[in-house]
Image (cartoon, rainbow, N blue to C red):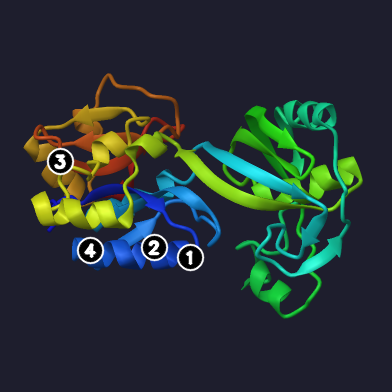
Amino acid sequence: MISATGGVIVLDKPDGITSFRAVQLAGRILHEKKCGHAGTLDPMATGVLPICAGRATKIAGYLTVQDKEYDVSFRFGISTDTGDVTGKTLEEAAGASASEDEVRGAVSGLVGTWMQTPPAYSAIKVDGTRSYTLARKGEAVELAAREVTVTEAGMLSWSPEGFRMRVACSKGFYVRSLSRDLGNRFGIPMAVATLRRTRCGPFSISDAVTLEQLEAAVRLDGASGVMIPVPRALAHVPCRVIPQPAVEAVRQGRTPGPWLIGFEPAPGELVLLAREDGDPVALVSLDPSGAWSIVRGI
């Protein structure tokens, strides 16, 4: 049903299901058992969820490291154990609010690089166990703060009940942590009311299809119209076309060095090797000694 090389489907994930479940449903539609997502979304979140199908599952890890953008709304006057309105209520303060000027200033002040403590309900592992598993058992979870970067942040609307904002951020940024941090700044309980991811790396909401649209596309032309090929999905990675003898050598695990003489990217920088017809072969890199190595066969 999908191409021999597979590809990436940009799914507009519906709310109420896990990212894992969304992948399962997309895989059934595609008639493809080998599927995985690049960047988890909470069950209550919607929007851009890149799903790698077929051989494209081998590049999923190289898509999750890219920046993301979110459209999020917060509710004043309530805090929960998860940081969003689906969680267990911890505190309520009827009528609690922050002024429009306070919110606008706090949101614009998020731009920059700083340390953020992830929420207890996260997939981060603590001694081999997911943090959310420990939190659900009622165990105290203390996660170390991590460096995050916010490149853009702006308030979109405000009311006495809450506000809506847009944020562009690095991998590892937790929007749900903002309900805690901004709530502490304003001195009121807060929770995420709605969350929509509008961009994940090169994939934007304009590229996304719903499960219903994906099913219709598959019935029409086998999903070729909505499947993003691996080279396009890795457009941020330099690509070098290699001849067939080099393709065979790389697929046998031999160095591609003899065919890349004169091409010298920065040490450690990933390079995509492809056949003349565009079929992806492998991700390779140049180590500090000047030797090429295969990072990931595709």
Q: Label 3 is placed on what type of residue?
A: Asp
Question: Percent from the top left, x then y, of residue 197?
Answer: 51, 44
The disc, 3 or 1, on the residue closer to the chain's N-terminal end is 1
Name the secondary structure under disc 3: loop
What whole-number distance in Å separates the C-alpha atoms at marks 3 and 2?
27 Å
Tag 4 near tag 2, CB within 8 Å: no
> Would you call the spot at circle 2 few (<14 residues within 10 Å), some (14-19), or many (20 or more)?
many
Tag 2 near tag 1, CB within 8 Å: yes
What whole-number distance in Å separates the C-alpha atoms at marks 2 and 1?
6 Å
Q: Residue under circle 3?
A: 279
Residue at (72%, 72%) from the top-left corner?
135
Name the secondary structure under disc 2: helix
Q: Label 2 is placed on what type of residue?
A: Ala
Question: Percent from the top left, x then y, of residue 202?
Answer: 40, 34
Q: Label 1 is placed on what type of residue?
A: Thr
Q: Residue under circle 1?
A: 18
Q: Is residue 49 left or right of residue 135?
A: left
> Would you call the spot at circle 4 few (<14 residues within 10 Å), some (14-19), or many (20 or more)?
many
Question: Percent from the top left, x then y, of residue 68?
Answer: 52, 38
* Tag in front: 4 or 3: 4
Q: Is residue 54 left or right of residue 93?
A: left
Name the secondary structure under disc 1: loop
Name the secondary structure under disc 4: helix
Q: Residue under circle 4?
A: 29
Q: Nearer the viewer, residue 284 or 109?
A: 109
What whole-number distance in Å separates the C-alpha atoms at marks 4 and 1?
17 Å
Residue at (29%, 47%) from the top-left corner?
8
Is residue 150 placed above or below 76 in the rendered structure? above
Q: Is residue 4 left or right of residue 290?
A: left
